[in-house]
Amino acid sequence: MGASRSQKTLARFLAPKIELKSPYFLSPEESHHLKDVLRLKEGTWIRLLDLEGKEFLARVEKLGKKVLVRAEKILRQEPPPKVQVILLLPLLKKELLSFLVEKAVELGITEIIPFYSSRTIVKASPKLREKLEKRALQSLKQCGRLWPLKIYQPLSLREALSLEAEKKIVAYEREEKVTLKNILESFSAQKLLLASGPEGGFSEEEISLLKDAGFLSVSLGPLTLRAETAAFYLMCVSHLLFFQKS
């Protein structure tokens, strides 16, 4: 058995709960992408992600409203991430949240929890989580990650204070002494909680509440960053200093 072209270039599709050698129907959305967008034919080799740590080499068996495929062998298999990095992400405009979710997938963030606080401007739409999950899965297919990013319903900042982690870090523009690099260079825990503020920043009262809940405030440098930049910065630095050591 051999794929017609390099396995690394084969298109990826989502196939939750698929089993090796068993026939499987792709969802209508994935089927549409396969036959109408990519215009793949019966007999074509593809890759399938089961969203539980496995990537399969599979063959398209029959085109239809739901495309029939069959997984022939496991290409990759990974255990759940041993390092958990959770991002408390402020509610921002939809396009900014979508961008940050996409980058969170690529940078290895394991969970995103949107939150709102006293200076939050944007209100969450009823379908926000659903839309962000869709964007996250699209990014997962593109980058080759095997375990999906978990996204939760928005919480208030006060609700988020009870979240548990071995290390909790909040970016704060008035912090002058401690930098994120200082904290993460010597970090060895398996669960990290990161937080950055909304467009109006955190109030002094909110920072006090965060510190009382075990968050360490850190500086992201001498310049004033936009809310989306601060969140992206947190993800990038944690990836560089944390994931690459793990």
Image (cartoon, grey):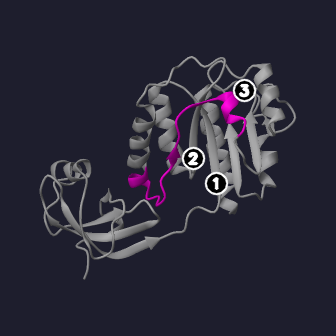
Q: Which residue is mark 3?
A: 223
Residue span colored magenta: 140-162
Percent position (x, y) of residue 222?
A: 77, 28
- Image quarter for residue 12? bottom left
SS of the residue under disc 1: strand
Q: Which residue is mark 2?
A: 111
Circle 1 Cα neighbour tier, 10 Å, few/some/many (<14 / 14–19 / ≥20): some
Q: Which residue is mark 1?
A: 84
Position of the C terminus, as image quadrant, is bottom right
Residue 218 visible in this rendered orientation of the protein: yes
Q: Inspect the magenta stretch and tell me whether residue 157 lies in it.
A: yes
Along the polypeptide, which appears first: circle 2 or circle 1?
1
Circle 3 Cα neighbour tier, 10 Å, few/some/many (<14 / 14–19 / ≥20): few
Residue 196 visible in this rendered orientation of the protein: no
- Which residue is rendered at x = 28% and y = 76% of the image? 21
Question: Which amino acid type is marked by label 1?
Answer: Gln
SS of the residue under disc 2: strand
Percent position (x, y) of residue 90?
A: 60, 29
Q: CA distance from mark 2 to mark 1?
A: 8 Å
Instruction: From the viewer's side, name the closer residue of 166 and 109.
Output: 166
Percent position (x, y) of residue 68?
A: 18, 63
Left or right: residue 67 compared with residue 179: left
